[in-house]
Amino acid sequence: MSGRVTTAGVGGEGLASMTTLYGIANCDTVRRARRWLDARGIDYRFHDLRAEGLDAELLRAWAAELGWQVLLNRQSSTWRQLAAEARDGLDEDRAVGLLATHPLLIKRPVLEVEGRRHVGFSEKLYASLFAGKLTADSCQPSVVSSQQSVES
């Protein structure tokens, strides 16, 4: 399945050194991203959306930065299970409310690195994001697939 990786940046220079991967543990795309990071020895914190959820204020900031349409996974089973009234006529406020109530509606993974957020997974993008942190040994082929597509 093809997809895209979305990138945007905001301030937050104080958090620049912290890398966080937001997702759910049983999502195939999140697992691929985690394997990629682990295989290269990249330090990161995993934030499990199912277990930890997300603060509405953070979601509002992400929606302002990336666009709520990018964050909303309309391909998920959670989306299909919502009542039509909940899905119809969405605007940013209603979408953020839905995402806060149903964090599994967030397109994943969301990678936060150096004050920027990136939605989806692409080996090429991750390699460029961490180029200065990778050693020659960590760039060797690993168990991670070379597939460049993103599953939502």
Image (tube, rainbow, N blue to C red):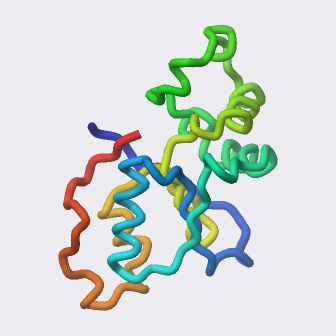
Q: Quadrant of the N terminus?
A: top left
Residue sitting at 44 percent across and 28 percent down? 75
Horizontal and vertical percent for residue 121? 39, 55
Residue sitting at 34 percent across and 57 percent down? 122
Q: Quadrant of residue 64?
A: top right
Residue sitting at 22 percent across and 74 percent down? 142
Where 74 falls versus 147 (above or below)? above
Horizontal and vertical percent for residue 92? 72, 30
Where 68 falls versus 82 (above or below)? below
Q: Quadrant of residue 106?
A: top right
Q: Quadrant of residue 136?
A: bottom left
Residue sitting at 37 percent across and 80 percent down? 131
The answer to whether residue 144 is left or right of residue 87 is left
Task: Please identify the residue farthest to the right as the structure is shown.
Answer: 57
Horizontal and vertical percent for residue 60? 75, 44
The answer to whether residue 35 is left or right of residue 47 is left
- How many marks the image carries: the answer is 0
Where 39 falls versus 28 (above or below)? below
The answer to whether residue 48 is left or right of residue 101 is left
Q: Quadrant of the C terminus?
A: top left
